[in-house]
Image: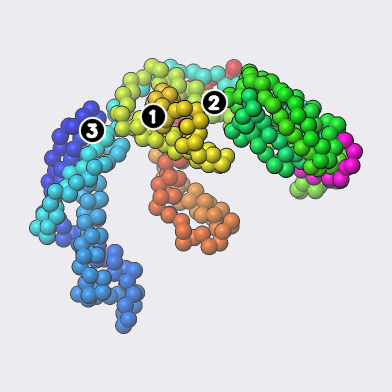
């Protein structure tokens, strides 16, 4: 087995690999062993079909196709390992010759860039103390009470605290805005989940009553497309229900789990909120440390890495739009932009995300931060069991090798971030 390489661009090589007849026979044998293992033929036990009869049952072409894939995968991995080539991505596979005597192929390799990090100990991020306030516990208790509310029909006008169902349409300059129509929309008046002033307009309305009114969206409104604009609303109320909330008693606490009294429930809520806040603080410290390290480090990113990250960001955005029953093409048409326009706008963030990933990878490599097979197996078994609990028929659908790889990457990332946080954190 021989190979040659040549530079085709900064951070990119073209690797050409040549395998002899003797090299290829190794992979033909592997292909036959793999096929035989799962082959069932009358007169033989599964996996026990003699190789001299194998071709009669599956055909020589099937064996050669599998052998070709094994040869390319195996030889490429061997060449990269022997030459210590740190590959980010392999692409543009081209088979120049494929005969019983010889296999010659080439592949384009995008390499991980050399990353020169500033000393980690020179970066210090202050950790903020985490505090759970009484009003936060009370807010959670109110949410729990709402989840156990009893609704009763109400004939009179809607009041604050009532749960109503309405149809509404929102227009700007007479044109319905995107996502501005909803039918039988449930609203609890006073929860203030809508544009400021909307829920107040519902007070006094009765079943099947209709009302039109105008509101100006705040300049800092979450929906930036209508922020600061005057909007016209048309609302029809179809249902009004009085909301009866349970009292906060020991008996109420017992209905929510293994709590003996209300104090135990409050303690549980406080602990949960604290854990959530502590995790957010961990994330903030780690991200702040990474940003500081990137500022003073030398990281040159190959364009293919940025392009792939941008593609991933576009795909994620498309999935988010689908969840909101929107299409990427229609969204882009409405805002008058193309995917390329988005990529230009998002490129700085894509570069930042790639630099973060490269920094984490380099810290792990420089400090020998690794994940043991036992750690991966433990996490994998837990995940598989969790999936099986939700769907007992899912076992045959799981891609275990892919799951193992993803788990290993995730565990190594977590270990690396733990290491970084210990070095870069200072108390206030």
Label 1's element? helix
Q: Residues within 10 Å of mark 2 (few under 14, many from 20)?
A: some
Quarter of the view holding residue 236? top right
Indicate left or right for 64 with 334 as reference. Answer: left
Q: Is residue 157 magenta?
A: yes
Residue 221 seen in the figure? no
Give x and y (percent) for residue 244: 86, 41
Residue for badge 1: 340
In the image, residue 212 above or below residue 89: above
Label 1 or label 3, whichever comes before in sequence order: 3
Q: Which residues are magenta?
A: 146-158
Disc nearest the viewer among 1 and 3 = 1
Residue for badge 3: 12
Q: Residue at x 50, y 28 (%)?
A: 335
Residue for badge 2: 284
Label 2's element? helix
Give x and y (percent) for residue 303: 31, 29
Q: Residue at x 41, y 27 (%)?
A: 341
């Amino acid at each position: 087995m021989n190979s040659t390489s040549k530079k085709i661009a900064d951070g990119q090589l073209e690797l050409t690999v040549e395998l002899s007849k003797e090299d290829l026979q190794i992979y033909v044998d592997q292909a036959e062993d793999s096929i035989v293992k799962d082959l069932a033929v009358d007169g033989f036990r599964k996996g026990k079909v003699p190789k001299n009869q194998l071709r009669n049952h599956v055909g020589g072409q099937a064996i050669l196709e599998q052998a070709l894939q094994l040869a390319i995968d195996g030889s490429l991995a061997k060449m990269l390992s022997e030459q210590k080539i740190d590959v980010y991505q392999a692409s543009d596979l081209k088979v120049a010759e494929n005969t019983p005597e010889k296999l010659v192929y080439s592949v384009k390799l995008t390499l991980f860039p050399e990353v020169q990090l500033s000393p980690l100990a020179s970066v210090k991020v202050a950790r903020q103390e985490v505090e759970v306030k009484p009003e936060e516990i009370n807010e959670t208790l109110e949410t729990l009470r709402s989840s156990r509310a009893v609704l009763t029909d109400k004939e009179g006008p809607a009041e604050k605290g009532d749960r109503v169902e309405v149809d509404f349409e929102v227009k700007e300059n007479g044109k319905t805005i995107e996502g501005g129509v909803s039918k039988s929309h449930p609203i609890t008046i006073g929860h203030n989940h809508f544009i400021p002033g909307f829920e107040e307009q519902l007070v006094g309305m009765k079943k099947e009553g209709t009302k039109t009114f105008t509101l100006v969206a705040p300049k800092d409104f979450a929906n930036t497309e209508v922020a600061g604009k005057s909007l016209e609303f048309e609302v029809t109320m179809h249902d009004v229900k009085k909301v009866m909330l349970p009292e906060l008693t020991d008996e109420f606490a017992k209905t929510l789990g293994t709590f003996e009294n209300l104090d135990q429930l409050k303690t549980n809520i406080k602990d949960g909120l604290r854990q959530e806040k502590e995790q957010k603080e961990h994330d903030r410290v780690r991200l702040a440390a990474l940003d500081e390290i990137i500022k003073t480090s030398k990281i040159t990113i190959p364009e293919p890495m940025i392009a792939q990250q941008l593609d991933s960001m576009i795909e994620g955005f498309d999935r988010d739009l689908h969840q909101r029953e929107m299409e990427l093409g229609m969204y882009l048409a409405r805002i008058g932009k193309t995917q390329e326009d988005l990529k230009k706008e998002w490129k700085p963030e894509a570069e930042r995300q790639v630099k973060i990933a490269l920094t984490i990878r380099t810290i792990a490599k420089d400090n020998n931060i690794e994940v043991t097979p036992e750690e991966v197996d433990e996490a994998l078994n837990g995940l598989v069991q969790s999936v099986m609990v939700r769907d007992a028929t899912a076992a045959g659908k799981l891609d275990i090798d892919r799951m193992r790889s993803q788990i290993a990457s995730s565990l190594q990332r977590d270990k690396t971030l733990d290491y970084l946080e210990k070095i870069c954190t200072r108390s206030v």
